[in-house]
Structures are given as structure tokens and as C-alpha cells.
Image: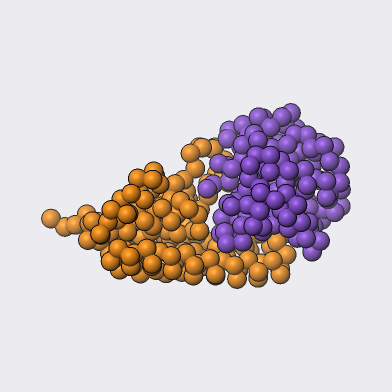
Amino acid sequence: MALIDLIREDVVRVPLAANTKEGIIRELVQTLAAAGKVSDSEAASRAVLDREAKGSTGLEEGVAVPHGKTLAVQSLAVAVGVAPRGVDFEALDGKPSSLFFLILAPPDQSGPHIEALAEIARLCRSKAFCRTLVSSRDAKEVVELFQD
Amino acid sequence: MTKPIRRILAYVDGTEQSVTAAQYAIVLAKSLGAELFALYVVNTRALSELVKAHIFLDSEQEEYHRDLDEDAERYLNHVRNLARSKGVAVTAERSSGAVHQEILAKVREHGIDLLVLGEVSQIRSRRDELYNETERAMRSVACSVLIAKNEDRIAELFEELV
């Protein structure tokens, strides 16, 4: 399953309500749970928070890619969130993060997990694309930008 | 007349769609009397990119590399078992590097006539970055490509195969 097929309106949050790192992660996991993609929100959040404890996935230019392996999903799941005002995600450049890609994968599907992360890494090289995503007004606009 | 399809390669990446593709490749190999190959590529290119992009920690790269090695073994064994259950011989191989380049190399190395892949994205994006490895292989490989669709029909065909 290609990344683009996973990004649908029900897994996109614009704007995110949370304003802390943990809150953002839990909100995005909850979004996936509401979309029927996560069976145990607490286990999934814990997997991502444990990974973040080893080192932040807050990159430069306001992008963060929190991810984790968990049995709480049956297949690769991706949520996208936008926080226009920015949230401290302990990013590499110390700046607030505004664009979040949360990825959950079952432990036996590392191939698709890695490929999805690599696709996001390639996308994030386009600063213009990321800026446009952050200025999206709603989930529909985000999905349209990916499918444009 | 020369057989149009003598060697078939199924690319397996750990997705359900790729396992369906492998089943279809087994059905085709048996029906056409073709030689069957299966390939899993440990995507070390992506692992390196993720460390470079600071998405992965060094320790995470090692952990995921081990996971990918295990996945390769598991999925190739699964294909071996599927083929064996239908009396089809399969050469199952693992390689590592950039996925689409490894597929291209195997197609050349074995003189593959037909590459069988799992479903590609139904959404066409103008963004090249969103082409996944399966789609890259489909676009760049020199031989004919078959995209396995309709999982239920393929499962039926596989079950019917004696």
C-alpha cells in the first residue's frame, strides 16, 4: 500500500487541538483509532512515546515524524496533523514543529513501515510543499495537496 | 513457437498485496510451465536515508535492519511453502540496496520475461516523491509487468490449482 493511499480525510487533523508533544502524539493516535485503524490507543501511544524518549523525531523546518511499532495496528497506519502555531517537539533546530506525520506499523511489517518513512523524508525535502500543507485550512485540503 | 513467458519474477515486500502477487505468479508458472523466481529486497537505501534525515537513530537503523532480515526470511519461506504446496519449484532470493534497482538487476540477471507485482497506488499524483518502490520498478523495468489485482479471484485460482 502506497503512502498516498493511506492519507484520507479521516486520518488528518487540522488544526490539532493539543499543544504539547505528548498531547500531539495522543491526539493523532486517537484520530487513527476513531478511523478504526488502532485497536488499543494507549499501547500505540506508548510505543511512539517510548521511541521519542530515545531521541526526538522533530526534524528541521517544523516537520516531525513520530513513529513506532505496535501490535495495536494490523497494517501500516499514517496520520497527518497540522498545528499552525507550532508546538515544542524538541526539534533538532530548536524551532516549534507545525507538521506531523505519525506512523504506526505492526512489528512484522518493517518493509512497508520503512518505505512510508522514506517517502515522507523525500516529501519533506520540499519546503514549499510543507509550507503549503501547514497553511491548509482543513483535512480535505491536505488530502487534495497529496493527490494534486 | 517460443514460449512467450519462460521466467517469472514475483517481488515480495511484506504487504498482503505482494503475497497475492506471489500466489498469482505461482498459478501462472504452473499453467505456463515457466520457471519461477521470488525476490525480497532489504531496503538498505531507505534505512540510510532515514538516518541521514534524522528520522532514525543509529540504533534504530540496526534494529530495523534485523527486522527486515527476519521479514525477508519469513516472507520468502512463505512463498516457498505456497509454491511447494502446488508442486512448483521456486528460486527465492534476498538482496539488499535500493528496491527498484535491485529488481531491475534481478530481471537482467535471470532473463526474466514477466515481473509480477502487488497492486500499485490507485491515486495518480504529480509528485514523483510519492511513487513507491513498486511503482518505480513497474515504470523502469525492461520486461513486461503484470499487476496482480482482485485478491479473491487470485485466491480462488490458487486454491483450484492442483
**In the image, what residue occupies the spot 36% across and 50% down?**
B155
- State left or right for residue A10 relative to residue B103: right
Front residue of A34/A136: it is A34
User: Residue B85 sits in which quadrant?
Assistant: bottom left
- State left or right for residue A5 relative to residue A129: left
**Can the viewer see residue B146?**
no
> Which residue lies most toward the left here?
B1
Q: How many dots with numbers?
A: 0
Front residue of B55/B29: it is B29
Placement of A117 over or under B153, stated as above or below: below
Task: Give the letter of the purple chain.
Answer: A
| Colouring | by chain
Residue B33, percent from left and from top: 22, 61
Residue B11, percent from left and from top: 42, 58
Q: Which part of the image, by quadrant, shows the C terminus of chain A?
A: top right
Residue A128, percent from left and from top: 70, 39
